[in-house]
Image: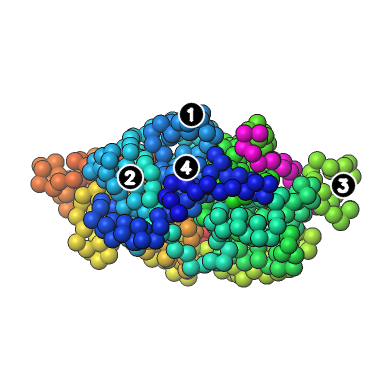
Amino acid sequence: MSRTAIAQEFPDLLNPPHGGVLRDLYLPAAQAEALKQRSASLPGWDLDARQLCDLELLMNGAFSPLEGFMTRRDYEGVRDDMRLADGTLWPIPIALDVSEAFAATIKAGDEVALRDRECVPLAVLDVEDVYFIDPLLEAHAVYGTTDRNHPGVHELLERRHRVNLGGRLRGIQAPQHHDFRELRDSPRSLRERFIAQGWQRIVAFQTRNPMHRAHRELTVRAAERAHAKLLIQPVVGLTKPGDVDHYTRVRCYQALLANTPSDSTTLSLLPLAMRMAGPREALWHAIIRKNYGATHFIVGRDHAGPGNDAKGIPFYEPFAAQELVARHQAELGIQLLPFPTMVYAANRDAYLPSSDVQEGDEIRDISGTELRRRLERSEEIPSWFSYPEVVSILRERYPVGAAKGFALFFTGLSGAGKSTIAQAVIAALLERSSRPITLLDGDEVRKHLSKGLGFSREDRAANITRIGYVASEIVRHGGIAVCAPIAPYRDSRAEARALIEAHGAFVEIHVDTALETCEARDRKGLYAQARAGRIAQFTGISDPYEVPQSPDLRLDGGASDSTTLAKQVVALLRNRGLVA
């Protein structure tokens, strides 16, 4: 099996892959083992969660015709025109971003070992290009906005690095998954299964939510309309922060499909890192499903949309995704199945497309927020909305009375008042509740958890990552983590946010106290020593503080006393429904 391409011929059987060839970037076993051994001597990059998802789908062919991470020419063509350098349609940049410090050690012609979080080598990148990007330009072109309320934009502007490596990949081994292994198909294995079952016309359905009766009605009707079989292919990589975890969702899908004939419907998981890019993402999803062998793809209302912007206006028009996919349908080679929202008409005791609603129909619906509220309060979830088996799994995931964990993350200059305000907030919360609260103060963390770390950018980033990890574990178990480090760098704060938001809410509070006030409060004389040059890399004097662009709350630590400021924090938590 060559690393670049294996032409698969499916005449009159399955839809050909995008570009005509299903890419398989894995080396033969002997070559992979030799490269694995040699990779230990190569410069290495540890992939984050999104990069791991991208790498897996590059290597198994789901991102065909791509053969690696995009070079500048491909990246700019995709960003500006949704075209690779050779003219092939492709709507989303697939780039390997790395730190500037690492990029400075790499040049075209080098090899870079790509490793997972346990430092296991998965692939080697043959570097063809090292290039800087303009993240604001990418945000505007790909997402249509620079509003950080958009999760994809927030990820791009706050967390991703500004320099990319581009080049071809040589695959050593696939990322390891311990969960639902029997449901994790590659494009090749799923195509082989379709052929073995005699399936030729296949409708693919994308989802990142549990499926209820409306979703089931929609998918069954779509398959019937297309005279096709049904592929339920939920995303189990990265979705929108706050979504139901994939373990719970997959159990719901399995329960839903338990009584469905296996000769008409199948379930397969997709380890995709979604960007929530609306119309462009819908086009991307269609290409991916074509690579898995689908002939039809369901695109619903506001497909892959992230909700509303800072002004409460939807980021994308409700049918923009359907319109973009329709414009490229002939070139795509996969048929669009546009579907309106399915709604329940109580007077008919039936689901029907929203376009078929007539005057006098009694329409009922339960939003995701309302469903969560009913679960948490053990209120009835009507049978017209969902299935008993699905509701049972969701009730287990969201038990009555279970407290939601969250993290308060105070950031600001030394002497801004972070720890004092944090202590006042903790006192205010404990006056009203017995919930466990853990304070991760910057000075205390450095004495214990981060003992031995210095104040270089790398060490400061490691310190914040450690705080983020510990806080995420506290949040995961329903506790409250109150963090009060300086956290001067935007990318480090974004890393902590990502760790915590995997399990609960992250509330960023910028204590925006004037530098002169911080210096006046300095009982240790640290600012004076920094100005005299006796302390290097001191934030605010000889090292930068990157001001948060859109914190949940901004406080002036010199404008009022800590008790008054703490009341603002508690009010925010109440408004967010995090405390009573």
Q: Could you give the CA–CA distance between mark 1 and mark 4, rounded to whole angstroms?
A: 18 Å
Q: Name the residue: 72% across, 54% down.
A: 229
The residue carrying mark 4 is 66
- What is the crowding at mark 3: few (fewer than 14 residues within 10 Å), some, or many (at least 20)? few
Query: In the figure, is residue 536 to the left or right of 539?
Result: left
Residue 275: x, y in percent?
A: 51, 44
Residue 410: x, y in percent?
A: 37, 52
Work out which quarter of the rendered image holds the C terminus and state it.
Answer: bottom right
The residue carrying mark 2 is 126
Badge 1 vs badge 4, beta-carbon distance below 8 Å: no
Q: Could you give the CA–CA distance between mark 2 and mark 1, rounded to whole angstroms?
A: 25 Å
Q: Could you give the CA–CA distance between mark 2 and mark 3, rounded to whole angstroms?
A: 61 Å
Residue 78: x, y in percent?
A: 48, 33
The residue carrying mark 1 is 80
Badge 2 vs badge 3, beta-carbon distance below 8 Å: no
The first of marks 3 and 1 along the sequence is: 1
